[in-house]
Image (spheres, rainbow, N blue to C red):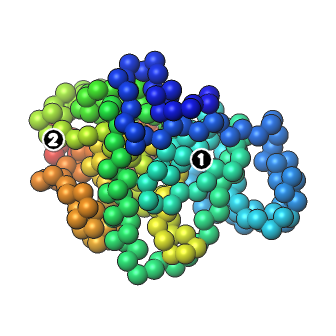
């Protein structure tokens, strides 16, 4: 759907309007029905193909085309409807911030062509630049929590209905939602399912009020990139407007970023007292998702968080 203003894409979502710093979603960048390979023939075809790391759901390749351009092609290992439309929308919104994200070049139903950012060596000050960039990104806010549409966290659909209260949003559409999915896949016991729901009921006791900040949504270290110029860039978003602390929490789940990232962030956008101690609570969402997708290997970490905050 083409939107001419931010108000267009929240229309019907019971919002009272959008702040001027929320960019509109772009027109959907669909190519006519064709394969990604067929699209490439309009640019001289694929002259060279280099496999790139794609995670669990994508096959990712760098294509050197006949017209001399280099692009990145993403295709699913297992078809997931709406996956690349959601990613394209997220990349467009993240482009408001100072950190580089790849431009969307073309999109088909089951493929996505994006700008090739290249690969470089980290330049001096990279970590501080990343911290300041994330702080600036999180300073972009919305009047409500959520996003224009659902998107994906991994291959799991991530609901983002516009919600006035941040505690209600995180409780309902993050913790309870994933706990229900994990219970349905028999990865979470009835008792642990109850514990997650009970913890969700207590979020106001544990987490201070925060604005609805523009979040990457899947900010683990694998989605951070160093471009050809040695500058930080962001990849593979699960974008929504939510708690900035929750976005930062993901940077600690599978390997913490260097300390200068957090120090530089705090200089630009000071964090509330106790923020570091709250990070595992936010990461419960991602642990529940991994439990749902990959099984009981993550159950111990889920229970550790539940024990700590119960």
Q: Quadrant of the N terminus?
A: top right
Secondary structure under the numbered disc 1 in the rendered image: loop
Camera-nearest residue between 111 and 192: 111
Q: Quadrant of residue 288?
A: top left
Secondary structure under the numbered disc 2 in the rendered image: loop
Q: Earlier in the sequence, mark 1 or mark 2?
A: 1
Question: Where is residue 230 shown, x and y percent of the image?
Answer: 51, 75
The tag on residue 208 is: 2
Q: Residue at x 60, y 61 (%)?
A: 53
Q: Can see residue 295?
A: no
Q: Quadrant of residue 179?
A: top left
Characterize the local packing of mark 2: few (<14), some (14-19) or many (20 or more) Cα atoms within 10 angstroms: some
Camera-nearest residue between 286 and 72: 72
| Image-based side of 116 in relation to 90, left or right | right
| Image-based side of 182 in relation to 156, left or right | left
| Image-based side of 132 in relation to 114, left or right | left
Question: Where is residue 16 shown, x and y percent of the image?
Answer: 35, 23
**Looking at the image, is 137 positioned above or below residue 51?**
above
Question: Where is residue 87 shown, x and y percent of the image?
Answer: 56, 43
| Image-based side of 116 in relation to 19, left or right | right
- CB-based contact (under 8 Å), mark 1 and mark 2: no
Q: Residue at x 33, y 64 (%)?
A: 131
Residue at the outermost bottom position: 124
Q: Residue at x 50, y 28 (%)?
A: 9
Characterize the local packing of mark 1: few (<14), some (14-19) or many (20 or more) Cα atoms within 10 angstroms: some
Badge 1 is on which residue? 57
Question: Where is residue 241 shown, x and y percent of the image?
Answer: 37, 39
Q: Residue at x 15, y 41 (%)?
A: 208
């Amino acid at each position: 759907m083409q939107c001419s203003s931010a108000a267009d894409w929240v229309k019907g979502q019971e919002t009272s309007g959008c702040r001027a710093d929320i960019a509109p979603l772009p027109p959907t960048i669909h190519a006519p029905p064709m394969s990604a390979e067929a699209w490439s023939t309009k640019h001289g075809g694929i002259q060279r193909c280099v496999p790139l790391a794609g995670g669990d759901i994508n096959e990712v390749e760098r294509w050197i085309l006949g017209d001399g351009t280099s692009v990145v092609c993403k295709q699913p290992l297992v078809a997931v409807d709406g996956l690349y439309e959601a990613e394209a929308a997220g990349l467009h919104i993240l482009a408001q911030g100072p950190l580089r994200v790849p431009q969307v070049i073309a999109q088909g139903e089951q493929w996505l062509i994006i700008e090739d950012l290249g690969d470089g060596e980290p330049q001096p000050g990279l970590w501080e630049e990343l911290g300041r960039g994330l702080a600036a990104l999180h300073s972009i806010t919305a009047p409500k929590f959520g996003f224009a549409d659902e998107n994906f966290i991994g291959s799991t659909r991530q609901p983002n209905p516009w919600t006035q209260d941040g505690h209600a949003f995180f409780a309902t559409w993050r913790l309870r939602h994933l706990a229900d999915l994990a219970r349905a896949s028999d990865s979470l016991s009835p008792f642990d399912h109850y514990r997650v729901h009970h913890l969700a009921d207590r979020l106001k006791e544990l987490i201070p009020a925060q604005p609805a900040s523009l979040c990457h949504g899947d900010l683990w270290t694998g989605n951070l990139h160093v471009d050809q110029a040695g500058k930080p860039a962001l990849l593979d978003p699960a974008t929504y407007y939510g708690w900035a602390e929750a976005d930062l929490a993901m940077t600690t789940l599978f390997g913490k970023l260097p300390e200068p990232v957090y120090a530089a962030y705090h200089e630009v956008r000071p964090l509330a007292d106790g923020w570091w101690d709250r990070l595992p609570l936010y990461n419960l969402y991602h642990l529940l998702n991994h439990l749902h997708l990959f099984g009981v290997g993550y159950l111990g970490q889920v229970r550790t968080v539940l024990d700590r905050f119960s």
